[in-house]
Amino acid sequence: MEDKRQVVPGLEDNRDVTTTLGVQKAKGGLGKVMGGLGSLLVLVGFVGSNLPLIVGGIVVAVVGAVLGNHAQKVGQATISQRLVPGALHQVFETVEYPAAQDLTRAQIAEGSPGLPRFDSLYTNDVVSASYQGLPVWLAGLKLCEMALYRDPETEMEKEEEREIFLGLWFACDLGKEIGCDCTITPKGVLGRLTGSRNALGSEVFARKFQVQTDRPDWAERLLTQPVQEAMLSLLSMGKTYLRLRPDGKLTLAVSMGKPMFYLGKGSVQAESIQRRFVEELRGPTRLVDALRRSLP
C-alpha cells in the first residue's frame, strides 16, 4: 500500500487549484450573505409575529452556515493536498507530511519558549522534516485556557475554553551544545521563567524582546546582529517566542492569530498562496542559519 505521508514537490500546474479556491471562496461569501439575510428575516418575523417568516429565516441562515463551512473545509483540504507539499519541499530537504506522530503535551511543555500557561492544546499540519541535515518539527498550534464567566441568564459561574495562542510551533536540533539556557519573549509577556532578565542586544532588539538566561555572557555571543535581525523579521508574522537549551535544542513559537497554512481573505491564486507559505517557512530557517553561524 502506498504511504500517503510520502509527498513530492507540488510543482505541477496549479491552475485548477486557483479555480477550485475561487469557487469555494464565492460559496463562502454566498453563505455569509444567506446567514445575514436569514437573521434579518428572523428579526422581521419576530417584530411582525410572523411564524412562517421566522421559520424561513432560520432555514436560510442554517443553509448559509452549512454552505460556508463546507466551502471552507474544501478550500483548506485543497491547500493541504496541493500547495503545502510543494512549499515544504522548497524549504526542507526531506519531508513527512503529515507526520506519523503528533506533537504531545510533554513535547510542547519540555522546550516551551515562555508561552502562556495553558490547559489544552490542539495541533494541525504536523510536519517532520530535515533542514541542512538537522531534524525539524513543525506544526500549527492552538493553546487554550479554561476561564470562568458568569452566565447572565442563570447568574451561575461556568467554564469556557478561551484561546490564548494560535500560530506556528517550530523545533530544531542545532547539533551543537550552546552553553546556556536562554528564553526570549516579547516585551511585556509575563511567565514563570528562571534566571535573570537582561537587556541584551541592540536598542531596537531590547525594545521588542526580553531575554532571560542563566549565562548572559554566552547569550550575548549568540545574539549576533544576524540573529537579532532574524528575530525582528519574525515579528512581521506575530509575537515571537524562542527557547535555546544547553543541549542545542531550539524551540520557536510565533503567535500568528491564524492557523498555519491558512487561506485567509487574500488572493486565491495558487502560486501567490504557495509563495506566502514558503516565506513563512523561511522565517524560522533564517533564524537557524544565523544561530548556526554564531555557534563556536
Image: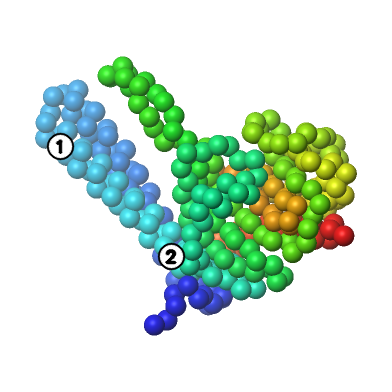
Residue 149 position in % (x across, y down): 40, 24
Above or below 292: residue 121: above
**Residue at the bottom extreme, as displayed:** 1
The residue nearer to you, when weighing 24 against 174, is 174
* 150 left or right, relative to 9: left
Task: Identify which residue is drawn at 28% across, 46% down.
Answer: 64
Quadrant of the rendered image containing residue 138? bottom right
Residue 152 position in % (x across, y down): 32, 19
The residue nearer to you, when weighing 225 against 19, is 225
* 71 left or right, relative to 119: left
Task: Identify which residue is drawn at 27% across, 33% down.
Answer: 40
Total marks drawn? 2
Q: Amino acid at mark 2?
A: Thr
Q: Is residue 264 in view?
A: no
What residue is disc 2 on?
78
Looking at the rendering, in which quadrant would you find the C terminus? bottom right
Task: Identify which residue is drawn at 81% across, 35% down.
Answer: 198
Helix, strand or loop for disc 2: helix
Residue 261 position in % (x across, y down): 53, 57
- Determine crowd level at label 1: few under 14, some 14-19, many 20+ residues with C-alpha closer than 10 A: some
What residue is disc 1 on?
55
